[in-house]
Amino acid sequence: MPMSLDHHGFVVIDKPENLSSARVVSHVKRTLDVKKVGHTGTLDPFATGVMVCCVNRATRLARFFLGGDKKYEALLHLGIETNTQDATGNKTAERRVPDCSEAEIQDVFGSFTGLLHQIPPVYSALKHTGVPLYKHARRGKPIQKPARQIVILALEIIKIALPYIRFEVTCSAGTYIRTLGADIGSALGCGGHLKALRRTQSSGFSIADAMTLEVFEKRAAGETFSRYAVGMTEALKDMPEWTADQNLKGNILNGVPLTQKDVALEELPGKDRFIKVIDENRELLAVIEQNEAGGEYHYCCVFN
């Protein structure tokens, strides 16, 4: 199969268990035979669910998705703690699970909503001196990072069947759900670890948008890229847009500075000041950012 230089967009994969995010990226790259594939957020190997891969030019848009909220479904196993806070680690403690009422459990879960400070796990991809924390931990030299601010937007118990609690959580980027589960277990007095974790929403995509690797391979072999991938303009659906005429298109492609006379969007929703500029065929020309004083824009990325 010849290299597909015209593949530019996003492929949403339902990552299987026991496969690293890096291997998913390699699989997509190899299947499509393209030069560049990235992603908008990793998943732990034991986790499954939504993993958004960006292909070729779309890798330049990854930054606009990294800070988005995410949603997960998790299974917490109370009474057993592990060094990784999930089922892949070694057992470090075992305690009797108290006979808590549903109301008591609900109260504990309720205390883990809103603005929180969470200590990242020592087994994580965060780096210390350029080396991932999990490598330090595997060498017997765990590094404890300081607590980071996170936001738990929603936390709902789906089912209680002690020692298991299945729950759903919507959270800010950078939240470790296995740490959340371990902290809830500690608050219940018995500790715990995550038995399973599934990401159901990420970067504006849901599990309904995702394909298994097997389905992806079949579609890549028998369909055009645009049939199963999400285009760059569509992926930025929540970003304000401006349609360029031929004169503005030429200015953008030649790097001419833009002002509000060129793109007259004065009021931008939310805290971000990004605008996607498209042509008459809804092809993405550029992403620009309005400076805080207004008036002028600077180019974030331009697509020739």
Image (cartoon, grey):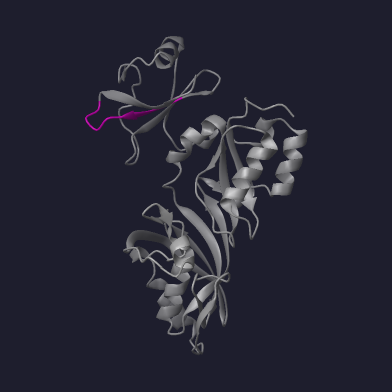
Vertical order, 303 against 58 (above or below) = above
Assess whether residue 290 is covered by the magenta stretch. yes
- Quadrant of the rendered image containing residue 199: bottom right
Residue toward you, 103 or 296: 296
Q: Position of residue 261 (x, y in %)?
A: 30, 16
Residue at the spot 51% in from the left edge and 35% down from the top edge: 59
Residue toward you, 26 or 68: 26
Q: Quadrant of the N terminus?
A: top right
- Judged left or right of residue 112, residue 138 is right
Q: Position of residue 293 (x, y in %)?
A: 21, 30
Residue at the spot 61% in from the left edge and 49% down from the top edge: 23
Residue at the spot 64% in from the left edge and 51% down from the top edge: 14
- Quadrant of the rendered image containing residue 163: bottom right
Q: Position of residue 20 (x, y in %)?
A: 59, 54
Residue at the spot 52% in from the left edge and 17% down from the top edge: 280
Q: Position of residue 225 (x, y in %)?
A: 67, 32
- Judged left or right of residue 215, residue 268 is left
Vertical order, 175 against 214 (above or below) = below
- Does residue 172 appear anywhere in the picture? no
Magenta stretch in the rendered image: 286-294
- Judged left or right of residue 93, residue 31 is right
- Quadrant of the rendered image containing residue 245: top left
Q: Spot the residue most to the front.
A: 139
- Does residue 33 appear anywhere in the picture? yes
Q: Spot the residue most to the left.
A: 293
Assess whether residue 15 is covered by the magenta stretch. no
